[in-house]
Each structure stands twice: as C-alpha cells, then as structure tokens.
Amino acid sequence: MSTLSPAVLKRKKRLSKLTPYGFVAPATITMLLLVVYPILYGFYISFFDTNLVNKWKWVGLTYYGKAFTDASFTHSLWMTVIFTTFVVLGHFLLGFVFANILNKPIRFKTFFRGVLIIPWLFPDVVVAYLFKWILNTQSGILNALLMHLGLIQEPIGWLTQSATAFPCVIFVSIWKGFPLVMIQILAGIQTINTDMYEAASIDGANGWQQFRYVTLPALKPILTTVLILDTVWVFKQFTLIWLTTAGGPGSTTMVSAVEIYKNAFNYFKYGYASAQSVFILVICYLIGVVFRRLLKDD
Amino acid sequence: MTNSQRARWGSAIRYFILVLGCLLVLLPVSWMIITSLKTMQDITLSKGVELFPNGPTVSNYITIWSEYPMLSYIKNSLISVGGSTIFAVVCAALCGYGLSRYEFGGKKFLLSFLLVTQMFPAVMKIIPYYKILVNVHLNDTAFGLMIVYASFSIPFCTWMMYGYFKTISTSLDEAARIDGCSPLQTFFKVVLPLTIPGLVATTIYAFLQNWNEYMFASVLIRSDDKKTLTFGISSMADAYRIQWNYLMSASIIASVPTMLIFVFLQKQLIAGMTAGAVKE
C-alpha cells in the first residue's frame, strides 16, 4: 500500500466516494424509469381528454373539478371508506384474537397456525371465484345447504342483491387478508418479554388488564405500521371485488379502484380516470400521515 | 371459581375459537377441492348437498390441459414472475447493501421514497404502463409484464434486504477490506452469504406477490397464449356457462407453488410476511 503514488491514492479515494452510488444505481435507475416516470406520465395524462392513440385534447384541471362534483366518484370514495373500515377492523379483530391464542401454550400450535395462514396463500383470483361459486344463486353450496336445512325457501342472490352483495364482498376480503395481520401481530407479541407479564400478574393484573397495559403498549409501533400498510392495501383492493361483483349490482360495491378501472378500460376515459387516481394517491398518502400522527407515542 | 377452573375454561374457549377459525378456513377450501373432483353433470344434478352422485373423479385435472392452454399460462407466469423476481432481488440486494453500509447524499430521500411507493395506488400506474408498453411494442408480451412486475417488487424487496443487512455487523466488512477485498467482493463473498435466509424470504415474497397478480396482466395482455395463470383462470369464467369444476381444478393448480413454498419453506415465508411490520 505504501508504494502507491499520491495520484493513485487520490483516484482511489474519489472512486470509493462513488462506491455507494454504484450499489444503489441499478435499483434507483430502474425505479426512476419504472415508477417515477409512469407516475409523472399519469399526471400528464390527467390533463388531457385522450384515447391514448391520436386524440390529445388539453383540458387542464377540468377533470379534477369534475371528480369533485361527480356523484358516482364521490359515491365510490364513500364505498371505499366503508369497505376499508370494515375489512381492516375485521382483519385486526381476527388477527388479534388468533395471534393472542397462538401465543399461549396450546397443543397442535403449528397445525392451527398453518391452517389459519391458508387463505393468504391463495391468489386473489382463486379466492374471488371460490366464493363466487359458493355464493352462487342457483347452484351454490350455501343456498343448497340453507334450503336443505329449511332455513330459507327461495335461493338468495348473495352477490346479485344489493342488500347482501356488499357484506359478502367485505367478508371475502376479511377472509383473504386476516392471516397476514395475524402473523404480523403474532411476530410482534413474541418479541414482548415474558417477565413483563409475570410482573403484571404478581401485581394482580387480570387477563384483560395484562392485555391493555402490557401487550397493547408494547405492540404499538408494530400495530401502527401494520395498520397503515393494511389500510392502504385494502383501500387499493381491486381483484376480489372486480371478479365477484364488478362493482354491482348497480353500484352497491363500486369502490374507487373498480370505478377508475371501468372508466379507463371499459369507457376509455383515460384522462378522467388518471385524474381520479391522482385523488386516490393523495388520499392514500394522507392515510399514512394521519395514522402516524394519531398513533404517535404520546 | 378457583384459578385452575378458570384456566381450564380459558383454554377450552381458546380451543373452541381456534377450531371455529379452522372451520371457517377449511370449509370453503374443501368445497374447492370437492368441486374440482366432480363432473359437470354432478354439479348440475346434485344441487350441491349430495357430494358425489357418481363418485369423485380426477378427470378435470386431465381435461383442462387440453381444454385450455394451461401449459402456456404456466410458462408465461413463470417467465414474467421468475424473471422479475430475479431482477428485483438482485437490484434490491445491491441497493439494500449500499444503504446499510454507506452514508451518501440522497440516502434519506431514497429511503423515504422506497416507503412512499407503497402508497401509490396500482390503478394509477396502470394507465401510463399501458400506454408506455404500447409505445415500445411490449404490450401483450411476457417480457413487458416482467418489467412491470419488477417495478412492483424492487421497492419492497430493497426495504426488506436493507433490514437484513443492518443486522450484520460491519466489522466483517472491515476485516474483508483489510484482507484486500474490493467493495463488490466484500458484498458477494462475505456479507451476502450471511443473508441467505433474508434473501430467500425476499425472493419468496416477490415471487408470491407477482404470481398472484391479476389486474395488470388483464390490461397488458390480450392474446390467449400470452396470458398468465391468474388471468387465464379468470378468462375460463368468461364463458356463458361457467365450468366450475374446471375453474376449481385450475385454481388448485395455480395455488400449488404457494402451497409447496408453505410446506417446505414455512419459516422463510413467515419471515417474508412479517418483514413489513417488524422492521425496527
């Protein structure tokens, strides 16, 4: 090393300054090309009335104004909020209950955990069609069973009646998504020091109090992250709804992702759909900000 | 009630809830399996309650290969998902290592950018992707889909790999450097071998995420022989009269890779599932 001339050393130093950029370059360049550029291009499209081929008519902010006053868009936003609230609540309720039980000394723990993970392993497409088949009006097993047991006389159109379609879609989304929340909460619970529970029970805390004053505070950071991620994921949910009800009947299950998809690829209103998706982007971002504020350590 | 009585009741309730949860999961799944073992005749005649009027059959699993281009569905899925996974994991490993080992201008920005991309609604990217791929004549190709899937995986995979590299002491890097290793050699020969479990979890996560993807495939792919498995399954249901037995057996085939990963790599799979939450 000592034989290297100062010039070579200098060059080496400059090179080593560039080393970190060499490591991050492939990912960064790919993301610039494949994430940043498309997103900016999406903004650009939202200012045009366009068929994406030969018609590019500048409309400025017209579509943004239109989205605000468009009853079907505000309806879809509202449906998305309700849908997200119920599904995330369901995920957390089931996730919490099962994670807590799986953390206790029980027999066949691996078996139970394995079975409860199964819904997460199926592709959305498979889950959507499985429940579309189970809930099928004419030949679905649910109607067949209920009629066999004499609980109903006529088959119910679970996914085709406005009263039942939305709850069914929510159920399917909870069924598919709760294992992920469960596993994440379980991983969080397992990092809690068991001494804390011992200390709490010596102090006379009952099960609920232990949960409230030991488990919950210790889990808070993890819960915050899982809550944000889960909310954003559910907010963007498309496949399960599109393939079970396609937003129908009427627009009773029309969440924003489905509405935007339909505007773009069924009605070819690409500019308007882009403007709508910019709104969704802003909302998803705000969800993250709001949750982080609300759940920040007091 | 004595303490031991209460404990016994508590554990009885726990098992009850667990069994209930398992039934909730297993009943729909078993209905999928049962349907896949029925003939269409049995499906229309039995009205559901009677399981197998003419006995179970595996004929659906044989017929779908000739009824539908299942092989090319699988091939396309493997090309687009496999290619994007390899590409994304390589980029993510390099980037995660760089982020965990060096201080450099723009690092903070890059880290928060990786998180913000998680917020981008997929539906916002789909219109530009569609247009861009048409422009470069990559729409309706497995390669085009591969590029799109790579863009989904890179941010999250980088974040995961960054987390794994941070758990490995930098003293190893220093030792390797003193022994005369270049930064790239240090990465490949010293640090990367230690993160193999993390690398496997990241790969599994990226693979499953894209294997299960449907929306982008349904927009970017047109011809039947270019469809991925999930999109192919959904087009089986476009028929006027859905062949539920075919649909369910194809669904089971589409779920096989995930099930195999689950059975053989359960630990890494769960590590992948929790990587998003338990970061720090």
Image (cartoon, coloured by chain):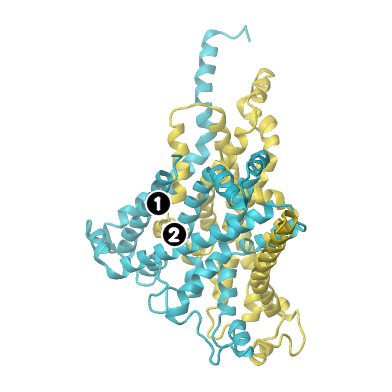
Chain colours: A cyan, B yellow
Q: If the image is split into quadrants, where does the C terminus of chain B sit?
A: top right
SS for dot 2: helix
Disc number at residue A27? none
Q: Position of residue B46 (x, y in %)?
A: 67, 90
Q: Quadrant of residue A248?
A: bottom left
Q: Please give the chain letter of the residue carrying mark 2.
A: A
Q: Quadrant of residue A32?
A: top left
Q: Position of residue A96 (x, y in %)?
A: 58, 56
Residue type at tag 1: Ile
Quickly name the residue at label 1.
A287
Dot 1, crowdedness within 10 Å: few (<14), some or many (≥20)?
some
Q: Residue at x 35, y 49 (%)?
A: A40
In the depicted view, which residue is nearer to us: A237 or A289? Answer: A289
Q: Residue at x 67, y 46 (%)?
A: B200
Q: Position of residue B75 (x, y in %)?
A: 64, 63
Residue type at tag 2: Phe
Q: Quadrant of residue B15?
A: bottom right
Left-right relation of A293 to A21: left
Q: If the image is split into quadrants, where does the N terminus of chain B sit?
A: bottom right
Q: CA distance from mark 2 to mark 1?
A: 10 Å
Q: Can residue A78 be spotted in the picture?
A: yes
Q: Can residue B260 be spotted in the picture?
A: no
Dot 2, crowdedness within 10 Å: few (<14), some or many (≥20)?
many
Disc number at residue A235? 2
Q: Please give the chain letter of the residue carrying mark 1.
A: A
**Earlier sequence position, callout 2 versus callout 1:** 2
Left-right relation of A226 to B78: left
SS for dot 1: helix
Q: Are marks 2 and 1 in contact (CB under 8 Å)?
A: yes
In the depicted view, which residue is nearer to us: B42 or B60? Answer: B42
Q: Residue at x 45, y 73 (%)?
A: A166
